[in-house]
Image (tube, coloured by chain):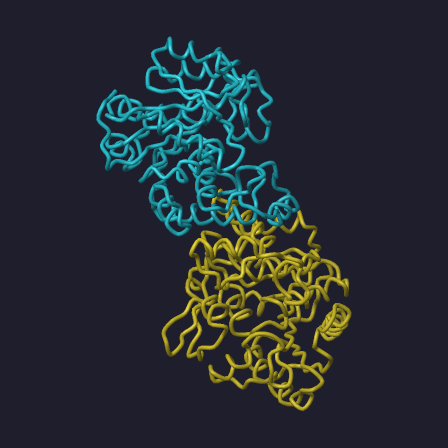
Chain colours: A cyan, B yellow
Amino acid sequence: MPQEIPPSGSVVALAGGVGGAKFLRGLVAAAPGAITAIVNTADDFTHQGLRITPDIDTVVYTLSGLVNEQTGWGVADDSTACLEMLGRLGEPTWFRLGDRDLAMHLVRTRLLREGLALSAVTERVRAVLGVPVRVLPMSDDEVATEIETPEGVLAFQDYFVRQACRPAVRGVRFRGAREARPAPGVLDAIAGARAIILCPSNPIVSIGPILAVPGIAGAIAASPARVAAVSPIIGGKAIKGPADRMLRELGHDPTAAGVARIYAGLANVFVLDRVDRALADEVREMGVKPIVTDTLMADPSRARALARTVLEGLR
Amino acid sequence: MPQEIPPSGSVVALAGGVGGAKFLRGLVAAAPGAITAIVNTADDFTHQGLRITPDIDTVVYTLSGLVNEQTGWGVADDSTACLEMLGRLGEPTWFRLGDRDLAMHLVRTRLLREGLALSAVTERVRAVLGVPVRVLPMSDDEVATEIETPEGVLAFQDYFVRQACRPAVRGVRFRGAREARPAPGVLDAIAGARAIILCPSNPIVSIGPILAVPGIAGAIAASPARVAAVSPIIGGKAIKGPADRMLRELGHDPTAAGVARIYAGLANVFVLDRVDRALADEVREMGVKPIVTDTLMADPSRARALARTVLEGLR
């Protein structure tokens, strides 16, 4: 952990779902130069024969302007004609495949079957949709988050979508992570980064899997770039998703300070919301510089303001 | 070629696309008891990673009431949101995949990948949609119609859809036909048939591939059931599709009589339209009994009347 910032390197952001994507959009608007997103792929799964990469899609849809702004994921003005017909054919419909979204899954699945790596597929989609950020999957190898619950082990999408995060979480594991290799470009981007940001994504199931891929956490620690993490918890609540409950159920403090503690070994800077300003001292005691600001990305201009504050905090 | 009609056997109909499906719907309404459709699969192809079986789908959609009555194929009230997004992703859009139709392709492709034979997939879809006819693909093995044109050999859907049947046809071949085996149930259905009907489908590319599967034409010739063929040509014109041009370009007489000549070795009865009544004698001279009636299936009641006339002609 470092003094020199190589000016030619990109800002590297580790990102999960909706929070990560919104922060990345803010980062683009803050215009720090080249940006590389390293995206969680442990939510990926195969459904109806299609390989689905929810976090990459959320990033790509958000940064290409296609995203459904109401939900934060999926494609705007999407329809569900195919899904309704799947139901008529006796197929399960708990995973709400949109018709437009389906096109992405079809193309990805076909290209993967033709032998392209996920990173190559993602770059192709990025280029055709004009996404102004380099988007790298954390790994081209399959890693799958599994949730241990009182009723048994659930695949992530089963827990997250089908069961709507209702089961209590006893443990989280990333199947395949130990054997996974960082996708091409990931380690180089980190090594040459101008700054590294852990986006306001779920620390357990969005950022956690990225850091579980052997080599990535070490590369961040060894990088000359400074590292900032942004809290996805405001006033003890996750802005979206089950992060607060998950933190509590896994024995963490379900607050911004609890998140800071998870990242304390890696981050130089921790960004928390004004409502959590009382926790700044606790963060400072971890040896991490706290930055207190508005972290709720209610619209793109607030996301840009947050990104600017984070970048300034990394100087 | 046969005297006895086993009353327990089903009426077996060899069918291709829209004409075959409409005739089958008429046959169901004519209520002759059990019906088995043996359907052309040489139009099948793989597109965007999906296995598509156009003739089986047209039969299934028509007999389940899902069909688009305007086109005669595809699902009624279908939309193209996925197709538009595929275009945005830089993918070809000449094959007009409907959103509802896509569900069928997804399910079929997944089940085939899981190891089910096409006949098992088709039976599953038939059952869930309540299709009142046993639907058998001609073969579970892949057979592919290829069209020889002055510009080279075209895959069938390339000729039929992408190039809208514009290229001249120099020859037609069915790749894989020689090694293909009739699907389970096909030969037994023919052997035990109460009557056999060659539907008013394209004799070259719809009925032709079925008869090219080793064993099927022989089983029809050996069956005790009488065989009727219905002309898809009225007044020298195909009701739908390129049958008339294709007959001419391949050196056949592009009339109902030309079709009768193709089927003369197999059919006992040939059904032609009133406008072609002058050709009845020519058909009779082939040793085939002509039946002159209204063959244009402008609505389901006319299809039923045609089916009744065909069944009466087979007594």
Where residue B149 sits in the image (x, y, percent)?
Answer: 40, 76
Task: Please name whichever residue, A135 or B48, is drawn nearer the observer in this view of the structure.
Answer: A135
Counting labels gives: 0
Where residue B303 sits in the image (x, y, percent)?
Answer: 73, 70
Q: Residue at x 40, y 16 (%)?
A: A262
- Quadrant in which the C terminus of chain B is drawn: bottom right
- Vertical comparison of A69 with A206: above or below: below
Where residue A76 sits in the image (x, y, percent)?
Answer: 56, 46
Task: Please name whichever residue, B30 or A24, is drawn nearer the observer in this view of the structure.
Answer: A24
- Vertical comparison of B222 with A44: above or below: below
**In this view of the protein, can residue B56 be seen by the observer?**
yes
Q: In the picture, residue A53 is in which quadrant? A: top left
- Quadrant in which the N terminus of chain B is drawn: bottom right
Q: Residue at x 43, y 45 (%)?
A: A109
Q: Residue at x 71, y 66 (%)?
A: B5
Task: Please name whichever residue, B138 or A245, is drawn nearer the observer in this view of the structure.
Answer: A245
Q: Residue at x 44, y 43 (%)?
A: A63
- Vertical comparison of A151 with B87: above or below: above
Where residue B84 sits in the image (x, y, percent)?
Answer: 52, 56
Residue B190 as seen in the image, left or right of residue A121: right
